[in-house]
Amino acid sequence: MDFSLPEELLQLKAMVRKFTEHELFPLEKTVIEREAGRGLTDLPALPPEDETRLMQRTAELGLWGLDVPAQFGGQGLGALAKTVVVEELNRSIVPFTLPPDAPNLNFLLEACSEEQFEKYLIPYAKGEKLSALALTEPNAGSDAGAIQMRADFIDGHWLLNGSKMFISYARKVDFFIVIAVSDRQKGKRGGFTAFLVDQGAPGLHIMRNVNTIGEMLTYELVFEDLELDPGQVLGEPGQAFIPLQNRLGVRRLELAARCLGYADRLIHLMIEQANVRQTFGKPLADRQAVQWWISDSLMELHAARLMTYHAAWKADQGARDLRQEAAMVKVFATEMLAKVADRAIQVHGGMGLSKELPIEYIYRLARIFRIVEGPSEIHRWLLARETFKQGKPYDMFRL
Ligand SMILES: Cc1cc2nc3c(=O)[nH]c(=O)nc-3n(C[C@H](O)[C@H](O)[C@H](O)COP(=O)(O)OP(=O)(O)OC[C@H]3O[C@@H](n4cnc5c(N)ncnc54)[C@H](O)[C@@H]3O)c2cc1C
């Protein structure tokens, strides 16, 4: 068993670490201030001019398209490389994502037709287009099988009617992957269809931004007799559920990698504070309570990292079914981050709660992460269901 990272990944990791420290850390104060000051508006936390500069810089460093297969103009480095990079970037709170955003890429790779390659996949893979997944509805989130949005095939066209809720960055993206019910009888087993809907399509209304805690911007969408050609169906009609599940699995690994980066940063901050801050004539580092917070955080981060890297490694070995791994790392890493962020606040006292440091920002992100991409309870339930079905515990060696 080999736990070392290959030399090229070590180099990549070192390069991204330098980028994070030189380019992202200096922007943190701005991000904290903008996020705190935007109130109920949808002002992005990262100024657009800074985002453009970071995009150019990462393009120069060759950091785009890391996990895009070579035939689509990417580097084809795979899931482990992406995990290493996402972890390093997320040692900073600056909300900067390298193009392309992997989960939707995987959906497109799995389901695009040849015509759709040119219009959607290639520009998306090159970082020229952004997309969002529109799945959640006002009455269906965890239970994605309960979505109501209708897709009716009438006179050679599809008509979409219904609403979607909490759709991230809806105003910014170029197109949406929209999941709708094309056959109510079949439901998620053959009755869900995915559609490619361009930004600004007649009948698509972005009703309002729905502000939540944390930096993410989400929106409510309404679709009113939105008409689409059959060429806008992504994959086979009625067959959206499987690529959708795979897409959600990739996002869960990515979310876990983000948690590793944030937790690593928090532990660094805790160590620094414990060494510097004196109370009652001694540094906090001498207090057993503080030592235990740091030790517990180290152990939990280590376990989460092993699980996440293992899942990414499995993906790179060609494992198709990563549902159990995705569920485990999503729950474990997000709950690990919540605990580490809570301890980091406690070690820092009042300063931990202040907006002078990035700690309370991460604390709030950690709270979101336990709900987005499926709440912890759903993943625990899925894991138990799969385990009972198989009648034996999880086998980490099974590909
Ligand atoms: C910041 C943010 C960004 C988002 N971005 C997107 C996006 O881009 N696209 C998109 O489609 N969606 C997006 N979502 C929606 C997100 O995926 C849903 O909020 C999430 O899946 C939970 O659904 P819900 O909010 O409807 O909660 P509900 O389904 O109402 O569940 C509420 C709670 O009930 C409990 N629960 C539910 N079912 C069970 C069960 N079977 N057993 C035990 N407990 C249960 C859980 O604790 C859960 O937290 C986003 C949400 C947020 C907050």
Image (cartoon, rainbow, N blue to C red):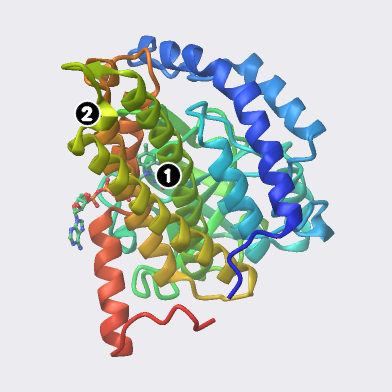
Residue 5 visible in the snapshot: yes
Residue 238 visible in the snapshot: no
| Residue density around tag 1, few if under 14, some if 14–19, many if 20 or more, within 10 Å | many
Q: Viewed as shown, does residue 373 lie left or right of 225?
A: left
Disc 1 and disc 2: Cα gap in Å? 19 Å
- Residue at the location (30% across, 72% down)? 383
- Residue at the location (33% across, 16% down)? 40
Q: Which percent across, then down, holds residue 204?
A: 49, 36
Q: Earlier in the sequence, mark 1 or mark 2?
A: 1
37 up-or-down from 178: above or below: above
- Residue placed furthest toward the bottom: 391
281 up-or-down from 290: above or below: above
* Mark 2 residue type: Gln
| Residue density around tag 2, few if under 14, some if 14–19, many if 20 or more, within 10 Å | some
Quadrant for residue 81, please give it.
Answer: bottom right
Of the numbered discs in the image, which one, if any, rests on residue 79? none
- Residue at the location (37% across, 64% down)? 327
Task: State which quarter of the image contains the N terminus.
Answer: bottom right
376 up-or-down from 3: above or below: above
* Mark 1 residue type: Cys
Q: Which percent across, then down, holds residue 199?
A: 59, 35
Circles 1 and 2, Cβ within 8 Å, touching? The answer is: no
- Residue at the location (49% across, 32% down)? 169
47 up-or-down from 21: above or below: above
Q: Which residue is mark 1?
A: 259
Q: Which percent across, then down, holds residue 397?
A: 49, 81
Q: Viewed as shown, does residue 296 lie left or right of 174?
A: left
Q: Which residue is mark 2?
A: 346
Q: Which percent across, then down, holds residue 267?
A: 39, 36
